[in-house]
Image (tube, rainbow, N blue to C red):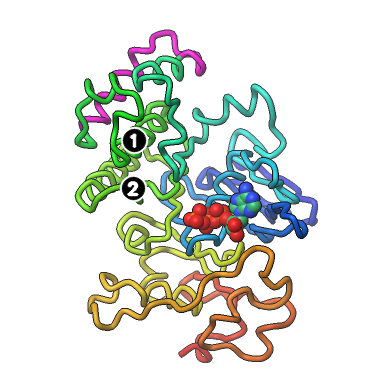
Amino acid sequence: MALSTRYGNGSTAVISDDVSCRIQNVTVKYKLDNGEFAAIRSVSANIPSGKITAMIGESGSGKTTLGLAMLNGVSHPGRVAEGVIEYTGVGDILSKEGEELRKLRGKHVGMVFQAAQSSLNPLKKVGSIIIDLAKSHGYEDPKVLIRSACDLARRMSLDPDRVLSSFQHQLSGGMRQRVSIILALILEPKILILDEPTTALDILSQATVLKVLREIQEERELTTVLITHDMGVVAELSDQVYVMYAGKIVEEGNTSELLQNPRHPYTRALIQAIPRLTGDRSKAVPLLGSPPEISSTPNEGCVFAKRCAFRLDICEYGETPRRITDDGHQYLCHLNEEGLA
Ligand SMILES: Nc1ncnc2c1ncn2[C@@H]1O[C@H](COP(=O)(O)OP(=O)(O)OP(=O)(O)O)[C@@H](O)[C@H]1O
């Protein structure tokens, strides 16, 4: 059944069965000593059901902040200044609070945080954490979750007995990362947000975890949001991708099409910076400079203009046009495809 919502800006959005979450005009601001600044700038995105959607961008582009907003988890000094984040069958999570919000988190939408170690209670063994989780989410028999955790641990090349009987400090960073993923998966959320799920892992563990995540996503048809700065992980795992820069989505589309034919100069630069995607190490071109801080991001013009190889005078002013290509890509740029050729 389709759900239709009228938003404050007058547009009507429709959530159909194949969209699990609709992010509409979301702005998140942080209060700093010298004022309040936007880390997410009027972002809209659809998260399709049963697919892996990647959010990619350099450090500071706003990916984690958007993930937190999707859980209604932005806290002081941050706040969601405007927007709607609507889950099918649930409504706008930003309007939920208290017990209702707590129940939604974990069971409907789960998140594995980037700093995985800090999300594990240091005073409890992993087995006890799972029992607490079962109680707080109303499971009559915690063994259901323990069994599921053991199964997932084996699949992620971990010894289940060792993991369950360990405190977080007895596990390596890579093991803690995998345990956090397991804790999120055992509640069987409909939507899982993974913030840099493989950053703390060595190459071999990375490959194992990516393989298991892909398998589980397929088995459960799990709607997954993958937050990463690694274009290689995007290429390997995701179906759809949103490219973020300075709090804005600058390009979006189907992953294979977008990687084959990137339009936005920032997406191109990200791809060119990765040897294994260009296929030739000597041709990798590092992305120069760094993304702006939220307090220095221009409020007018293209957010990428300062670092863009295609910059025109016009880029510094006004609104940057959204362009839609024949293959369904969207990108924000003054230049059309000919101009970018
Ligand atoms: N608690 C906070 N207080 C003030 N500013 C913040 C806070 N959290 C994030 N920011 C700022 O918001 C912007 C976006 O940060 P965010 O962590 O969402 O980006 P990111 O793309 O996830 O980067 P990373 O991969 O490094 O976490 C950055 O400029 C960051 O400095």
Where the C terminus falls, by quadrant? bottom left
Mark 1 lies on a secondary structure that is helix
Task: Verify whether residue 169 appears in magenta.
Answer: no
Q: Residue at x 24, y 37 (%)?
A: 156
- Quarter of the image with the N terminus is top right
**On the rendered structure, is 194 left or right of 296?**
left
Q: Earlier in the sequence, mark 2 or mark 1?
A: 1
Q: Tell me if residue 204 comes above or below residue 295 in the rendering.
A: above
**Amino acid at circle 2:** Ala
| Viewer-nearest residue: 22 or 250 | 250
Q: Is residue 78 left or right of residue 130?
A: right
Q: Residues within 10 Å of mark 1 (few under 14, many from 20)?
A: many
**Front residue of this view, candidates 196 and 121:** 121
Mark 1 sits on what residue? 176
The amino acid on which the numbered mark 1 sits, given as a three-letter code, is Arg
With respect to residue 131, does 319 lie above or below? below
Magenta residue span: 135-154
Contact between marks 2 and 1 (CB within 8 A): the answer is yes
Q: CA distance from mark 2 to mark 1?
A: 9 Å
**Relative vertical location of residue 296 with respect to residue 337 in this rendering, above or below:** above
Q: Nearer the viewer, residue 215 or 121?
A: 121
On the picture, is 96 further left or further right than 109? right
Residue 144's spot in the image, x, y percent?
Answer: 34, 16
Cβ of mark 1 under 8 A from ligand 1: no
Q: Position of residue 215 (x, y in %)?
A: 27, 42
Looking at the rendering, which quadrant does residue 139 occupy? top left
Please provide percent x and percent y for residue 76.
69, 42
Disc 2, SS: loop
Binning the other alpha carbons within 10 Å of mark 2 as few (below 14), some (14 to 19) or many (20 upward) gives some
What residue does disc 2 label? 200
